Amino acid sequence: MTRLDGGGLMDKPFVLATDLDGTFLGGTQADRRALYRWIEDNRDTVGLVFVSGRDPEFIHKMCSSNELPWPEYAVCDVGTSIARVHPQKGITPIDTLEREIAAQWNDSGDAVRAALKSFPGLTEQKTAFRYRVSFDYDPESYDPRAAEVIDGMGHDVLISDNRYLDVLPRGVSKGPSLLRLLDHLSLPPERVLAAGDTLNDLSMLVAGTPAVAVGGSEARLIEALPDLPRIHHAKGIGAAGIVEAIIAFDLHPDAKEILTDVI
C-alpha cells in the first residue's frame, strides 16, 4: 500500500483523521483490510491523516511494511508533532505549525524528568520525543501530586487508557493540533471524520468535526464526551466503527456500497 495522489487534501471531499491503536488498527483483520483497501481504491476522493500518540518513526515503519495505507499527513506524539508524510521522502515536520508548540515546550524535557523522578507509579518511556515526556502509568501506586507539580511548571498532564501518562506543552494535544493542520490546509472541518477510542482522543473528538468513538472505547472517554449529533458512538470495534460512522454521517457516496460487509 504505497499509492498517494501526490497532492494536498483540499480537493478531496472526505478526509479520515484517525487514531491508530484501538481505532484504525482495531477490530478484526477482515474489517481492517476492507477499510484499508477501500481507502486505497478511492485515493482521489479520500484523504488520510493519522492522529496518534505514536512517534513518526513508528508510523513510517508500519506504512513501509505495507501494513497500513500511507497518510498524507500525521499529527504524532499526542499532537506535539505535525508532519507531511511521503513514502519516499519520509515524515517531514511542518515547521510553521510546530514553531508555537516548540516555544511552548521550551526544551522542558530534562526539567520534567527531574521533577517527576521521585514520584511512584511512573516509568519513563525511552522514545526520544521532542516536545513531550511520556510514562507508563500504574494507577495503583501513582501519586496525584505529580500532576500538581507539572501544572505548576506550566504544562499539561494527560492520562489515557488507564496506563499512559503524557506531559505535554500547555494547550497542546491531538485536537488543537489537528485544527491547526486543517486551517493550514484550508480544509473545512465538516469534511473530516475524527476517530478515536481513548481519553487522549477526547480533544480531537470535540474539536468540531464529525467524530466517532469506536466500539470498545475507554469508559472514561465515553463519559467525557458531550451528547452532540456530530459525535457518533459506534457499535463496531476499531475499523468497523470508522466505517459505521462514515455511513452514518454520509461522508462518502461510495462507502455504503463498498463497505457493507464490514459492519
Image: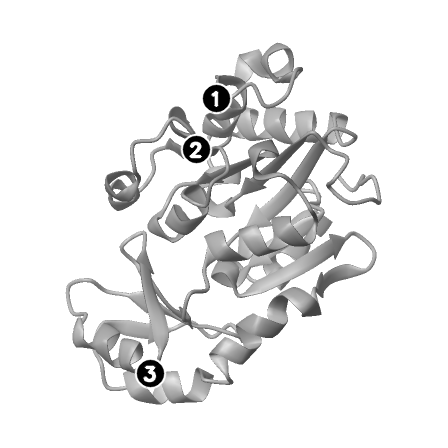
Q: Taking the image as drawn, is residue 108 in sight?
A: yes
Q: Name the residue located 33 percent from the left edge and 62 percent from the top edge.
A: 158
Residue kind at label 3, given as amino acid type: Met
Q: Name the residue located 54 percent from the left edge and 24 percent from the top edge.
A: 246
Looking at the image, which is closer to me, 87 or 229?
Answer: 229
Q: Is residue 117 left or right of residue 53?
A: left
Where is 20 relative to 214, above or below?
below
Where is 247 relative to 17, above or below?
above
Position of residue 122 measured from the top left corner of the image (x, y, whole percent): 28, 73
Q: Earlier in the sequence, mark 2 or mark 3?
A: 3
| Residue to which mark 2 is pinned | 212
Looking at the image, which is closer to me, 84 or 39?
Answer: 84
Q: Name the residue located 62 percent from the left edge and 18 percent from the top edge.
A: 255
| Residue to which mark 1 is pinned | 244
Q: Earlier in the sequence, mark 2 or mark 1?
A: 2
Label 3 secondary element? loop
